[in-house]
Image: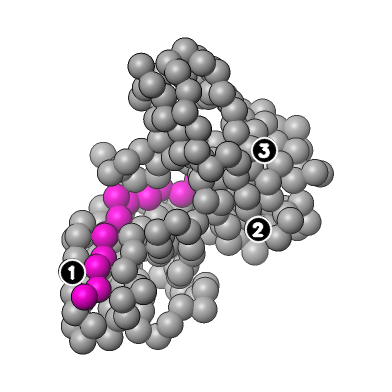
Amino acid sequence: ILNVEQSPQSLHVQEGDSTNFTCSFPSSNFYALHWYRWETAKSPEALFVMTLNGDEKKKGRISATLNTKEGYSYLYIKGSQPEDSATYLCASSSNTGKLIFGQGTTLQVKP
Amino acid sequence: ETGVTQTPRHLVMGMTNKKSLKCEQHLGHNAMYWYKQSAKKPLELMFVYSLEERVENNSVPSRFSPECPNSSHLFLHLHTLQPEDSALYLCASSLGRVSNQPQHFGDGTRLSIL
């Protein structure tokens, strides 16, 4: 994998559903993996920064895992709420420090 | 309150105009970034400044000219832009250029080139 790829591109779920999406990134020269939430008409907001293989981070109902050997990260949202509707971006960096972003997963949570 | 403020929020300009985008942060960060987001494309890094020194120029055309007079302010000077430069321009800052620090973003400037 040469770029950062996110799937699915978009997702529609009902309120109360749990959901997850994937970020794939180059595993060679990996340094850090970032997740951001970007709500419409607002600025991207940092959720997590992970660096170690096997890292798991949690913030309320949102959690993320990291596998640096195979080059993927999962973001999980438990019991989705309408306010979780946003685009979720992941970004990977090598030891050069430069962040490469994926195209994002757009989540719509229906009440 | 994001801590990173960008002005203007919207800008419409002709191809022969010269304008500047401004970014300001008071988070005590010493690295600042310009990103471009075109429709249907990922966020694309344009420039990185660390301690007021440009450390990354991501093959950006010379019609975009960044300036970082101090660690709190970052400008993007625009001249002779093309229609394909219409995009959302985001500024971000972080504590140090090391990428294990989260970046804090502004709301962006929506730029339209006529």
Nearer to us in this view, B30 or B9: B9
Instruction: Report helix, strand or loop for mark 3.
Output: strand
Where in the figure is residue A22, as x and y percent of width and height?
63, 37
When asked about the image quadrant of residue B30, the answer is bottom left
Three-letter code for the amino acid on which mark 1 is drawn: Val
Instruction: Give whichever of discs 3 and 2 has the lower sequence position.
Output: 2
Host chain of mark 3? A
Residue at the disc numbered 1? B12
Host chain of mark 1? B
Instruction: Report helix, strand or loop for mark 2.
Output: loop
Q: Is residue B111 magenta?
A: yes
* Residue at point 19%, 79% (across, down): B14
**The C terminus of chain A lies in quadrant:** top left
Is residue B103 among what the camera can see?
yes
Residue at the disc numbered 2? A3
Magenta part of the chain? B101-114
Number of the label disc, if any, that sits on residue A73: 3
* B92 in relation to B2, above or below: below
Three-letter code for the amino acid on which mark 3 is drawn: Ser
- At label 1, counting other C-alpha atoms closer than 10 Å, the crowd grade (few under 14, some 14-19, many 20 or more) is few
